[in-house]
């Protein structure tokens, strides 16, 4: 079993509130910040965390990394992404931004391109995006299907996604495809039957786009219940385009997460809080569509667990940057920097019902992002600046654009790359 010592950590965000300092406000206390810290990793898990002064020597580590005063945070947990697709919709984006008419078909364009693409092309594009995310500090990502909308294409999307992450989501109920335009009920039957049969072995989650123009409350219930009957956990695209039943359906059926939550009534906020449904907010979508941002403050004040995610997709939010989403959460959604930091890590873990990621402590997965900054505050303070200078994912140091200096203590450093 290989081990790694990380020292020189000026500020370590652990997301362990028992490490809070006296006088910290509640949002900061939740981060459990440790100053002048060190971390020991054994294999893929954290074995020790604390102030460097309390560590005896090297703690028996094989390798050592000195981050020279940098801040270290848990790896970002991106709990909402659509990465298995083909094609490009840049012209659609440009038309939307300039108010020009554009009739290329929106999501249908991506569906056609995805169906026509080879497995190799789809897999390579998804892997490229996962790597792009990792270079920005994302160590866990959820990946949805939803751009195939046939039994074979949805199943292959999930097979390809499963090669990249354990967090795979069956989204056959994304939109009704053109061939079922006059038989939406027939498509719901397909999603709940043969398509689910083919996809369930490759998925952990079931999702539905419950919106006007997509799937109504009854259809959403049918899809989610069918998935739950097959052992899949439920999440819902809810209340993005306008007021609607999505959040209420999520609460009613015990979904783990309601995603978007852009248009909420007081009753929706109360339903999320009462049912313990995580609100996964996706500010990249609002940025890319010039839509109103979710009211994060009302959710937080009601005690709702809030997560942040990118919604990385080719149509409405083609960003892979969790740091950007943190900055938007602070500047556009009035979250505090500490709240946004927690929501992008521990909040994302809660959205995926994971207790082994999103924090740094004994027994957690060794997922760390090293910032080229003295504090996590710089993620919002310096928006758009590439602050992630190194990533440890599952105990292994990724080969970043600016790789960290590593000293081998008996092992070949290349084994960790």
Image (tube, rainbow, N blue to C red):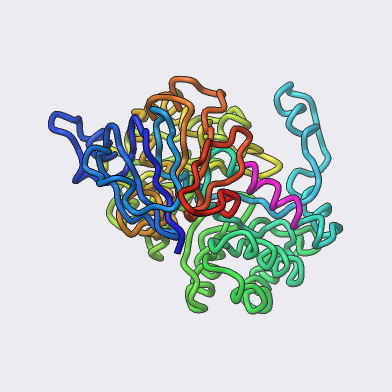
Q: Is residue 128 magenta?
A: yes
Residue 193: x %, y % from top left: 64, 78
Can residue 247 be seen in the rendering of this structure?
no
Examine the residues drawn in magenta and state their main secondary structure. Answer: helix
- Which quadrant is home to the N terminus? bottom left
Residue 353: x %, y % from top left: 40, 60
Quadrant of residue 290 in the image? Answer: top right
> In this picture, which residue range is highlighted in magenta?
123-132
On screen, residue 255 versus residue 313, left or right, reads left
Can residue 381 be seen in the rendering of this structure?
yes
Quadrant of residue 256 in the image? Answer: bottom left
Q: Which of 269 and 399 is in front in this view?
A: 399
Q: Which residue is drawn at 33% across and 37% down?
A: 12
Figure check: 102 above or below 158:
above
Residue 143: x %, y % from top left: 60, 56
Pick out the residue farthest to the left: 22
Q: Which of 16 and 61 is in front in this view?
A: 61
Figure check: 416 above or below 223:
above
Figure check: 194 above or below 61:
below
Residue 132: x %, y % from top left: 64, 42
Q: Which residue is drawn at 70% across and 55% down?
A: 84
Figure check: 298 above or below 379:
below
């Amino acid at each position: 079993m290989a081990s790694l010592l990380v020292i020189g950590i000026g500020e370590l965000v652990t997301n362990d509130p028992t490490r809070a300092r006296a006088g910290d406000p509640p949002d900061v206390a939740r981060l459990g910040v440790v100053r002048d810290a060190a971390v020991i990793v054994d294999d893929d898990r954290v074995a020790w965390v604390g102030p460097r002064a309390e560590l005896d020597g090297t703690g028996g580590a094989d390798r050592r990394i000195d981050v020279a005063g940098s801040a270290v945070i848990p790896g970002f947990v991106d709990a909402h992404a659509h990465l298995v697709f083909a094609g490009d919709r840049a012209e659609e984006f440009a038309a939307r931004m300039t108010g020009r008419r554009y009739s290329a078909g929106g999501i249908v364009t991506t569906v056609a391109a995805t169906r026509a693409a080879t497995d190799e092309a789809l897999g390579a594009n998804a892997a490229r995006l996962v790597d792009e995310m990792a270079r920005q500090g994302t160590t866990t990502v959820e990946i949805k299907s939803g751009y195939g909308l046939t039994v074979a294409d949805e199943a292959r999307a999930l097979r390809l996604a499963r090669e990249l992450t354990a967090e795979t989501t069956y989204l056959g109920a994304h939109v009704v495809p053109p061939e079922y335009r006059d038989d939406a009920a027939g498509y719901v039957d397909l999603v709940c039957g043969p398509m689910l049969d083919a996809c369930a072995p490759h998925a952990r989650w079931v999702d539905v786009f419950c919106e006007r123009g997509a799937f109504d409350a009854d259809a959403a219930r049918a899809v989610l219940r069918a998935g739950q009957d097959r052992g899949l956990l439920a999440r819902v695209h809810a209340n993005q385009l306008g007021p609607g039943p999505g959040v209420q359906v999520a609460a009613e059926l015990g979904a783990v997460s309601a995603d978007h939550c852009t248009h909420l009534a007081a009753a929706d906020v109360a339903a999320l809080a009462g049912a313990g449904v995580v609100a996964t907010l996706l500010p990249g979508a609002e940025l890319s569509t010039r839509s109103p941002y979710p009211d994060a403050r009302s959710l937080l004040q009601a005690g709702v667990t809030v997560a942040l995610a990118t919604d990385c997709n080719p149509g409405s939010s083609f960003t892979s940057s969790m740091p950007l989403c943190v900055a938007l959460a602070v500047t556009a959604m009035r979250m505090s920097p500490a709240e946004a930091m927690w929501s992008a890590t521990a909040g994302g873990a809660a959205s995926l019902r994971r207790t082994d990621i999103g924090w740094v402590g004994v027994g957690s997965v060794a997922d760390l992002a090293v910032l080229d900054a003295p504090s996590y505050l710089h993620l919002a303070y310096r928006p758009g600046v590439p602050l992630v200078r190194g990533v440890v994912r599952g105990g292994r140091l990724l080969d970043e654009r600016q790789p960290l200096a590593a000293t081998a203590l008996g092992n070949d450093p290349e084994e960790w790359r």
